[in-house]
Amino acid sequence: MDAFVIWCLIVGLLLITIGLTDTWRQELPVCASAIYLLAGYLLGPEVWGLLNLRLDTHPVLLERLTEGAVLISLFAVGLRLRARLRDPLWHTPLLLATVAMVITVGLMTGLGLSLGLSLGSAVLLAAVLAPTDPVLASEVQVQHASDRDRLRFSLTGEGGLNDGTAFPFVMLGLGLLGLHELGQGGWRWWGVDVVWAVSGGVAIGWSLGFAFSRAVVYLRREREQALGMESFLTLGLIALAYGVAIAAHTYGFLAVFFAGLAMRQVEREDNPRAQPPEVPLEDAPSGTKTVSDAGLAASVPPAQASAYMAKAVLDFTLDLEKLVELTVMLLVGSLITRSAFTPATVAVALGLMFVARPLAVYACTLWLPLTATQRRLAAWFGVRGVGSMYYLAFAVAHGASGAQTAFVIDAVLVTIVLSVLLHGSTATPVMRLYRRVNRVR
């Protein structure tokens, strides 16, 4: 049978099965990502050989696929977070994405050195594993735009921010390997890779997201134009923010996250007392989820134009997020080999999850208003996945190679697998118990 036909059958059956069993599966300690990983492993060279991508031979393709997945997810994360930028809720995710990130990189670099890696390879390993994942952590993210639970908000915000804040450390690792210019005494790394690339990405994303959202709301309210087509507008803004940021030599991940965040802030300014997604769409049919019909968009009261836009765009990106999760986890599963599971690679994964992550979280949150339970859960739920896969492919595409890079590849893949299995199997029951305890209080 033709390989394309086989692929159609497999992907079709997988999508239908996940769709039909989603409600039932949510009652079990099994996440969709684990199912996708298993399917990818079966499709890969270890079993059926239908998916034969390799990091050393297809790094650019894998980089682009994971890059697109992260961009879509980051934009969706930005749209989920409705708290004002001056809100104290932001203190925890900012510290987790910066201070905890630095501590994690330092601890994992030390572990890498103890395993015999060079300084460059150890820093690269630590940097690739440092960011938590915005794609796979849906169970522990905010449940709706007005969700002010400190734990969920912190983990969601951290996942949106640290995919960008990890980039300087990846560049540092590549620089120490001789694959990126750091400058005399590291001046270029500090000035360009840290200060300019981070601040520029934030400024570009926020400016474009704010201007875009205001323009669309104005056209809808005053001109009855730019109605519907939320999918086109969403993809256009993501691509524009990312393209401008990269052209300016800044971090596109931060730009896309802040573009989504700016869109949500525009909606908040226009509806300060409303609580999305409960903002009513007065003339929308009951049960409507994502609506892109221009006639329905035109029926939305002018005062709700920004709320309608934010909700429609968020619904679209959430659907895209599920598709990219499937795609990337299939790819990751196909890259897994039994030989990758060695005492050293498993030690890296367990060291990150049970030592580095908890120490980093506790070190930067002890003086913050988190309960003991929230602090423990934040220390545990540091899911690694698509973001780490992107940085791994990025490093290989930019020249990382050799025996130590092969170890880094194996260690990252093993960490992703164990993170998906352990975090995925505990997320549903633990968060259900957490919600129940909070309701009782």
Image (cartoon, grey):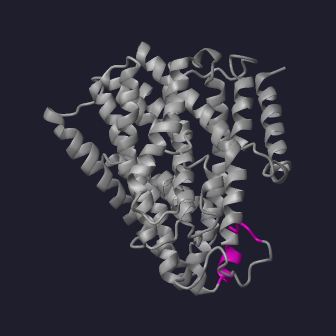
Magenta span of residues: 288-300
Query: Closer to the camera, 18 or 356?
Result: 356
Picture residue at 38% right of the left edge, 17% below the top = 116
Picture residue at 30% right of the left edge, 45% below the top = 249
Residue 335 magenta-highlighted:
no
| Horizontal arrangement in the rendering, residue 313 relative to residue 167 (left or right) | right
Quadrant where the C terminus sits is bottom right
Query: Closer to the camera, 202 or 101?
Result: 101
Q: Is residue 58 visible?
A: no
Residue 291 magenta-highlighted:
yes
Q: Is residue 59 visible?
A: yes
Picture residue at 86% right of the left edge, 49% below the top = 20
Query: Closer to the camera, 395 or 414?
Result: 414
Residue 217 place in picture, x, y as percent: 52, 77
Query: Closer to the camera, 13 or 174?
Result: 174
Quadrant where the N terminus sits is top right
